[in-house]
Image: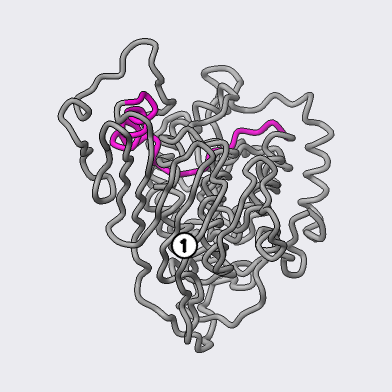
Amino acid sequence: MKSVSRRNFVRNSAAAAIAAPSIIPSHVLGKDAPSNKITVGFIGTGGHGTGWNLPAYLSNDDARILVTCDADEGRANHAKRIVDQNYGNKDCGTTRDFREVLERKDIDAVMISTPDHWHTLISVMAMRAGKDVQCEKPTLTIDEGKLLTDTVRKHKKVFQTSTEDRAVPVYHRMAELVRNGRIGKLERIEVILPKQPNGPGDPTPQPVPKGFDYDMWLGPAPQAPYTKDRVLFHFRWISDYSGGIICDWGTHLFDTAQWGNDTERSGPVEIEGTGNRWEGGLYDTVKDYDVTYRYANGVTMTCKPGNPSIKFIGSKGWVGNTGWRAPLQASSKEILESKIGPGETRLFTNPKGEHRNFLDCVKSRKDPYFPVDIGHRVSTVCHLANIAIDRGVKLKWDPEKEVFLGDDKANEMCRIRPGRGEWKLV
């Protein structure tokens, strides 16, 4: 990272890095010591941050939230009130600048629930400042994911790609049945993602609401006028901040697909797709899509819009479901009721979810169930779809080198974006 000008962050991070070998992390001190708890800073306290991630951390007694951070002062204060009410005090701090969270030496880990364009930048800065990280999905580009993975491994930090899918029984069960050959040789995977909500978004500039640090919200993204259709959940439909519906939902169902296909640390070798983007308004991400992937093992995966579903089809039957978290379905009762026996493949999960799994791994220093490299590969599958649609040609992908073969324009679409002002990833 360069040009991040906050003097204290640079000074304190450097000091922490020099002193790191002699510091005992607070989460490994004596059992009865107050610092025995894993101390957490919350960065991003919008709907998902307070509606999903905050309650999960508050329900785990070995975690302690010390500060809430959001570019919107009102949202940060709302999260603080929830934390203080839970703990019965007024101790939780607030800030609109995440660097103040990273400066704190009493913070062990951060939970990042920001828009996508901030995910990698804040995660990398957090790990360089000595923090373990749980971060919402996905990355913004393929090369961002490479950098994120390298940073986790270089600094030996625990990183959880934050989705619940691997703890959802129906998806875990589905992947285990496929991996253990219950449908025979896997031949095809059919993934259906939702249709994007209505657009095209109103680009008319509006006054920035009081208490909202809009420049901080934009961060590394290009300068753009404030409008209510640019922020909150709407950011997902603007390519400066997100990869659209495919990156939002694909990170869920493509993960189950890659898990069942035993390609979670690899990816397809060929992609082609058709579709179009929103035009005439603020939104510009992919609207309609029909994408086909081919893997080196002969498996074909398709992706179309509709009711979010997944289906694995093999030489001896199929297994899947229709609808998000819907009951398991199969081509036969025998497959549906099959037991995974001793000596067969058992896929790592934690039924208590991604937050509990992350906290356990902060203590054990092991990888969580959705580690950085697997999360990066799933985000890559999403990005490959968007790139294939934009290029309009069949693309060949080398999943080992993580480059397109013979297509410089497609490779350029993988790059880390330049960043605005002081916010740059290097």
- Closer to the camera, 234 or 303? 303
Q: Which residue is mark 1?
A: 75
Q: In the rendered image, which quarter is residue 374 located in?
A: top right
Whether 370 is drawn above or below 126: the answer is above
Q: Is residue 156 magenta?
A: yes
Place of residue 347 in the rendered image (x, y in percent of width and height, measured from the top left): 42, 25
Q: In the rendered image, which quarter is residue 390 located in?
A: bottom right
- Closer to the camera, 87 or 215? 215
Q: Quadrant of the C terminus?
A: bottom right
**Amino acid type, callout 1:** Arg
Place of residue 210 in the rendered image (x, y in percent of width and height, measured from the top left): 52, 77
- Closer to the camera, 136 or 250? 250
Identified at 34% across, 66% down, the residue is: 195
Q: In the rendered image, which quarter is residue 303 located in?
A: bottom left
Horizontal arrangement in the rendering, residue 284 relative to residue 96 (left or right): left
Place of residue 81 in the rendered image (x, y in percent of width and height, measured from the top left): 42, 53
Identified at 41% across, 33% down, the residue is: 60
Secondary structure of residue under mark 1: helix
Q: Which residues are magenta?
A: 155-181
Q: Which residue sits furthest bottom?
A: 204
Q: Visible in this render: residue 64?
A: yes
Whether 364 is drawn above or below 392: the answer is above
Place of residue 388 in the rendered image (x, y in percent of width and height, measured from the top left): 55, 62
Q: Visible in this render: residue 63?
A: no
Q: Which residue sits furthest left?
A: 333
- Closer to the camera, 1 or 265? 265
Horizontal arrangement in the rendering, residue 279 relative to residue 408 (left or right): left
Q: How is the rendered protein coloured?
A: one colour
Q: Is residue 381 magenta?
A: no
Identified at 44% across, 26% down, the residue is: 348
Mark 1: give few (<14), some (14-19) or many (20+) Cα within 10 Å. many
